[in-house]
Image: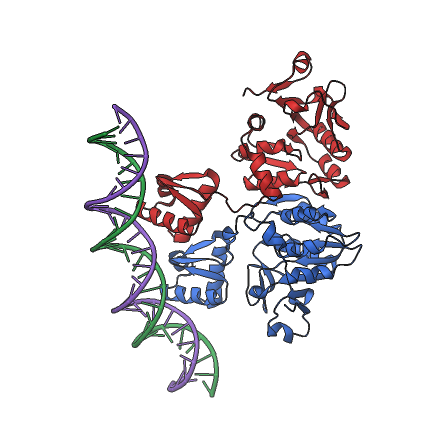
Chain colours: A red, B blue, C purple, D green
Amino acid sequence: MLTELRERNILDLLKQKQFIKIDEIIEKNNSSVSTVRRDLKKLESEGKLVRIHGGARIESNLQEEPDFQVKSKLNLVEKNDIGKKAAELVQEGEVIFLDAGTSTATMISYLSNIKGLLVVTNGLNIANLLSDFDVNTYVIGGLLKNKTRALIGTEVTDRIETFQFDRCFMGVNGISKDQGFTTPDIQEAQIKTLVMNRSRQAYVLADLTKFDHTSFVSFSKLEDATIITDTCPNWIKNKTNVKYMEVNK
Amino acid sequence: MLTELRERNILDLLKQKQFIKIDEIIEKNNSSVSTVRRDLKKLESEGKLVRIHGGARIESNLQEEPDFQVKSKLNLVEKNDIGKKAAELVQEGEVIFLDAGTSTATMISYLSNIKGLLVVTNGLNIANLLSDFDVNTYVIGGLLKNKTRALIGTEVTDRIETFQFDRCFMGVNGISKDQGFTTPDIQEAQIKTLVMNRSRQAYVLADLTKFDHTSFVSFSKLEDATIITDTCPNWIKNKTNVKYMEVNK
DNA sequence: ACTATTTTGAACTGTTTTGATTGATTTTGA
DNA sequence: TCAAAATCAATCAAAACAGTTCAAAATAGT
């Protein structure tokens, strides 16, 4: 087999797996141990990976600057039980919507091995992260709102009308008894409402700080989505018509 | 068998496979090793492929595409005379298109104080940078191509059909006498062509390394765009029907 | 039909790549 | 802590591959 093809295979495996064993490479490339070692040595000298006893791992991204994307990547993708729980609800072959924002970003690292998944989003940060994790992504086009990196406008809403989602996952700024789910921006609220109407199942991701708090615009009633949270206050639990999932830490 | 037919076969195989072994070519063309080697040598000298031990590889190795974040904000926005020159062409109130890619990114920092400007793009990295510099941005929605962070697909092309741009600025991988402007990806090439057809003025940003070099797909003739470059080779200058702007360093 | 030119394939030689073997080093588990 | 197991680095001969040369074959021109 060609040297460069082998190297490419190794790097491909690493992208998916982060760690890789010699035996796996041998099997994938049908080459001998010696050859694999040579390949790894070469790739290491090129800085493409780091050799460890028994295999290799990806070169940890040290060159990342604290700019928008990188910062978000580090913070957003960190282990998060709410995101994990939410991602576990997603089935193979589904079409789901991920809301622009930071909450839904915590799901992304858990989505990368779901087969046939298509994620639709209007968030530029979300789209970038999905791309980092090699998830099939459809970005809804529109005007870019600079503060939140969300795409908005009539093109976005028109386009959403043509979709039907299996599930949608929403961020939220406030959850209150009176106003339901609330968010600061009118246009983004409209989009959230629209998406929820066009989804079989709607979920709202929220940590404790969001409860008993009202933001500016209401986008949905409490009954219309399942709340996924770490610590659910009692007044929610007592409402029989509100669905919730509590992640045990 | 005819020489040109053999070369055609080799390039066809490469289109599908990215890598190719000598033996495969021998079988496909029923020619001897010597002939295959000669063919490969010729094709390599024409920049159509890269010879590697045991076979060949397509010239534009996308897989080497540095991990996207590596070419981070700092690199993209760095002072660049080509980008500055290009940005100076843009007038207030215009609607322009910026191609996905790194070349056009060098314009962005110079665009932020142009009043009433709307920038349309299908590149996620471009969109993020525009947002960083508070430029009004419209993102064309579509499927996200993970390698280049470009949005592609029929939704993109359909949407572009509804636009009319004052100017468009394109990146390029190769500029050659025969093939004109070329790029590695078919779908992105289609988008480039389409955008150029819908623009009053089209510009191609290119540094010296792009000249006398052919990538995979041709997206435009040399006459249909103004080349903005730092050092323009003589064969371009001598062609009376090709427009160019040379940035004096 | 004859010659000049180009193209082709085979033979040969030098180079690179490969996989097995060896002994050293590290990891593992009791 | 120690010994067995696994992994590693180094070496080397065999195999695969590349470059060169040259004569035969195909092609083009007169």
Image coords of residue A71 (percent x, y): 59, 40
Q: Nearer the viewer, residue A18 or B214?
A: A18
- Relative to B21, does residue A57 appear above or below in the rendering? above
Image coords of residue A147 (percent x, y): 71, 40
Image coords of residue A21 (percent x, y): 38, 39
Residue B93: tell me if it is visible: yes
The number of callouts visible is 0
Decide if residue B183 is on the left or right side of residue A3.
Answer: right
- Relative to B93, does residue B214 appear above or below in the rendering? below
Q: Quadrant of the C terminus of chain A?
A: top right
Q: Nearer the viewer, residue A233 or A113?
A: A233
Q: Quadrant of residue B181?
A: bottom right
Residue in view at x 67 percent, y 70 percent: B242
Residue in view at x 72 percent, y 54 percent: B111
Image coords of residue A241 (percent x, y): 69, 14
Residue in view at x 41 percent, y 44 percent: A50
Residue B152: tell me if it is visible: no
Residue in view at x 60 percent, y 47 percent: B149
Q: Nearer the viewer, residue B34 or B217?
A: B217
Decide if residue D30 is on the left or right side of residue A195.
Answer: left
- Relative to A132, does residue C18 appear above or below in the rendering? below
